[in-house]
Image (spheres, rainbow, N blue to C red):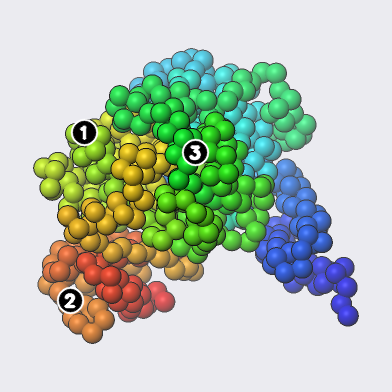
Amino acid sequence: MTSIAETVRDLYKSCNIGPDHSSSDYFALIQKLVAKRKIEGEVWQKYIDQVYQLVLTEIVANGGQPRDVVNFGTSGWRGTLGKDLFVRSVSFVTTAIVQMYQVLDKQQELVPFLGVSSLREAQDKGCVVGFDNRFGGEVLAAAVIDVLVKAGFTVHYAGESTTGVLSAALLELGAAFSINLTPSHNPLQYGGFKYNAADAGPAASELTDRITANARTIIADDSIPLETSSVTLVVPSERTDIRPFDSLQCWKSLVRRNVSRHGLDLDAIMLAFAIKNDFCVAIDSVHGASRLHIAPLFEGNGGERLIHLRANADVTFNGIAPEPSSVNMEQVGETLRARPERFKLGAIIDPDGDRIRFTDGTVEISMNQFGAMAYHFLHEIKGKRGMVAKTVATSNLANALAKAFHEEVFEPRVGFKEFKPVIGQALVCFEESDGISVVGHTPEKDAYIGLLLAIDMVLTLNVNLGEYLQRIEAEYGAYYPDRGGLPVSAKGEALKLILQGLQKFQAGEYVRVGENEQRIAEVIDIDGRKMIFDDGSWIMIRPSGTEPKVRYYVESRTASGTGNLVLAARAMLHEIGLL
């Protein structure tokens, strides 16, 4: 019988673990050990911890360059911990941001994008620094802080927090910018780096392009000395030259201050939940940063009617991809179905708290539907007036509502930063990948404001979310969206070249969808390629901005038609040679 020690040795060998960090695949080994832990229990945890110590050594000691070039996509820079994101590389990227402010006095064209007019103003207002639950977050934050303090910037230190909360803190503190170490919903091996300017939203391309260029130059020249020893010795909690603060209190303050704009009265909603004994809420934090906020967000209300799932710390996410998805929602659904209450609300939140998906135990509601429901709720129930903003890959249910309300629709390419032109005008901004914000809140997607909306819907209307969706669909029509992603080996320009093959699918061409030939009535190419058929159904294909994947999005006007559109999208990809 093979002993555990022998199995571990074999696993180390299969993942090429050795003295050379660059060739050691630590996360492949961690994933194998997590699989063992799932079956055989906590006896495997100490071996997982041992491998993470090797990852930590690589994060601190890696003196080379990132394996992949630094690139800020739709939501920051992401890569493998230890291989792409480590103390040295994160310090260089932070230096690239500092350099952008150091030229501000002479390059005033940056002022509208940065939201500050001088280096001194930026230094005085300072930077909000935080991280999600990922391994090494505090060490990487220490690297960021070390660079900022040496460059004369005030540092507001949040510690572990969520993206939406840090965005709110940036606004409430009046800081110049924020740095959040998170790869959002990506799998366990990823680290990430998000930068927001003074408006607290995802940075404009004019800034991220400059940061990318600065960082690549610094890394290529290797001309800036870096002492990593001070980073490992002085963790943020031990520094006296930074300003720790409670980021969730900042979030609450922002919501309360702007209640007249969005109509979401935090204190009244939580009090109403506390006394509504036939209403339960189940929230799955998937071990992410929201696990720290759920109890204080509800301020002790609800008792056993507030059920918090996967609320323990686990940087491995127990081996799953920690994203809001139908598979990951199963535990929330099962929990709600076992509850006796008449009204039930379930939600799953990704690790950095900028994505959320809902269920009432019977009906799963993605942001495609919920964003439209939020718009209906604010416009028709709360009496607010204004447009709706949604990405081009999102369901057209919101379009139908806006048409009925005689309001405008703002429909940009994928990426929350694309909503910048209508922040403060659109009642709701949402995207297909489960991100949402509302008027009077942050220009960053925020799971908590979505959660507050959902609770208010149930309390105000006295219905479950599925019933509310049925009412809306009965009046404005039903839409059936779906989306997926396929891993690809090609990337960058090579991937773009292959995807150009989709140009053969022009307006007027026919595509086989199920048993029928569908005619393409319109093509929208502001982001990938969206092909709209005569019956209003559509297929959209685009490269992911955060992972080595091609993403497809579909929407049918019938429940049975969605699967055929998914198959048609895959057939298109096969036809152009990508699969």
The image position of residue 425, as x and y in percent, is 24, 32
Rendered image: mark on residue 518: 2
Q: Is residue 281 left or right of residue 411?
A: right
Residue under pointer 1:
383
- Secondary structure beneath dot 3 equals helix
Identify the mark nearer the N-term, 1 or 3.
Answer: 3
**Vertical placement of residue 104 versus 76, above or below:** above
Foreground pick, 124 / 333: 333
Foreground pick, 403 / 539: 403
The image position of residue 265, as x and y in percent, is 38, 28
Task: For the residues labelled 1 and 3, say whether their Cβ atoms are less than 8 Å apart.
Answer: no
Q: Amino acid at mark 1?
A: Gly
Task: For the residues labelled 3 and 2, say whether their Cβ atoms are less than 8 Å apart.
Answer: no
Q: Amino acid at mark 2?
A: Gln
Rendered image: mark on residue 439: none
The image position of residue 233, as x and y in percent, is 78, 31
**Vertical placement of residue 364 versus 269, above or below:** below
Mark 1: few, some, or many residues within 10 Å (few <14, many ≥20)? Answer: few
Q: Quadrant of the C terminus?
A: bottom left
Q: Is residue 562 left or right of residue 488?
A: left
Question: Marks 1 and 3, Cα distance to the nearest angstrom?
Answer: 29 Å
Rendered image: mark on residue 163: 3
